[in-house]
Image (cartoon, helix red, strand yellow):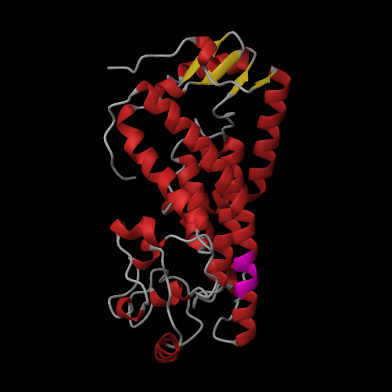
């Protein structure tokens, strides 16, 4: 049963774009993504591996075609014939101001997931960043294993030296989706033992993976979250993932990535400086995403007040 739709005048439209303005934004959106996506797509057609970008389209599941397709997001109406073609998507509706994504069409069964993400973003934003992990999560994923995750990429150390370094340096990973890829031997070495049930208690805004995940929480609620915000989160995730792999035990010089040797004091200082930079860049993206999702949640609950609690 479809939720009751609010009258057109009640849709929360705060911005109206002409067809020309929308076309310009769509062109700008594609122009900023093409330099990143085109080399990746070309490599994929050749069957070539790319450890940075493969992660962004395998671990994360938003297709490049959808990433390139511009939509304005909640509260923005677009005029003109091009926008009216969006009405083929049942999430959009035509109003006197133009075509807009309709929060009344947000599926009631997804409200628990939306609420879970809003809570996660709120709690993460409220915490102080922890910047002392030095990227040890990637090392813990290859510690005392004969089957590294990126088996086609050589390691920078032999297994004994790598193990000795891991054992000599504290591991303080708070991110469940990183921790679950630790080897069995590495898990007891971590100061924290994250589980799916403790994500809300442990997620913190200095974590590289928590800040990459802003991309996931943004595209998860497309098209209510607009493409400009999704692109901001994606491009930040690309740069964070690059640091993630440069600081890893893998030797990625064949891919044009010089190592950041966290096994040295200088490498750790450089890593921490970049981690802090990405924390600062992620904060406004987190705030904008949280504002959008709070609004969507309020409007979705108004249309489906009996939704139950749940998780993402």
Please report the residue visible at 55 percent of the width from the left and 71 percent of the height from the top.
131
Residue 67 within the magenta-colored segment of the rendering: no
Please report the residue visible at 69 percent of the width from the left and 18 percent of the height from the top.
19
Q: Which region shows up in magenta? A: 271-276
Drawn side of residue 280 relative to residue 150, left or right:
right
Q: Nearer the viewer, residue 146 or 244?
A: 244
**In which quarter of the view is residue 32 placed?**
top right
Is 136 drawn above or below residue 98 in the view shown?
Answer: below
Please report the residue visible at 26 percent of the width from the left and 35 percent of the height from the top.
308
Q: Position of residue 125 (x, y in %)?
A: 52, 54
Q: Position of residue 220 (x, y in %)?
A: 43, 40
Quarter of the image where the N terminus is located: top left
Is 264 drawn above or below residue 77 in the view shown?
Answer: below
Q: Is residue 276 visible?
A: yes
Q: Nearer the viewer, residue 312 or 148?
A: 312
Q: Nearer the viewer, residue 124 or 156?
A: 124
């Amino acid at each position: 049963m479809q939720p009751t739709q609010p009258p057109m005048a009640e849709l929360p439209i705060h911005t109206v774009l002409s067809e020309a303005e929308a076309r310009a934004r769509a062109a700008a959106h594609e122009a900023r993504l093409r330099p990143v996506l085109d080399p990746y797509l070309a490599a994929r057609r050749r069957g070539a591996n790319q450890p940075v970008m493969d992660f962004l389209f395998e671990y994360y599941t938003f297709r490049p075609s959808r990433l390139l397709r511009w939509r304005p997001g909640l509260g923005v109406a677009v005029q003109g014939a091009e926008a009216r073609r969006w009405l083929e998507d049942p999430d959009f509706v035509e109003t006197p101001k133009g075509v807009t994504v309709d929060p009344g069409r947000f599926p009631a069964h997804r409200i628990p997931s939306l609420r879970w993400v809003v809570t996660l973003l709120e709690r993460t934003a409220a915490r102080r960043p922890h910047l002392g992990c030095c990227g040890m999560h990637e090392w813990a994923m290859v510690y005392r294993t004969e089957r590294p995750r990126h088996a086609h990429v050589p390691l920078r150390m032999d297994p004994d030296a790598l193990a000795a370094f891991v054992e000599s340096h504290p591991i303080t990973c708070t991110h469940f989706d990183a921790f679950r890829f630790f080897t069995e031997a590495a898990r007891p070495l971590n100061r924290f033992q994250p589980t799916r049930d403790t994500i809300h208690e442990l997620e913190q805004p200095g974590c590289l993976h928590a800040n990459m995940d802003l991309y996931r929480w943004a595209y998860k609620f497309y098209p209510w979250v607009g493409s400009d915000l999704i692109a901001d989160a994606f491009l930040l995730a690309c740069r964070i993932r690059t640091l993630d792999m440069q600081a890893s035990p893998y030797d990625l010089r064949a891919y044009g990535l010089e190592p950041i040797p966290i096994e040295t004091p200088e490498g750790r200082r450089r890593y921490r400086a970049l981690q802090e930079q990405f924390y600062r860049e992620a904060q406004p993206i987190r705030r904008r995403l949280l504002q959008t999702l709070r609004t969507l949640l309020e409007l979705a609950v108004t249309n489906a007040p009996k939704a139950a609690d749940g998780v993402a």
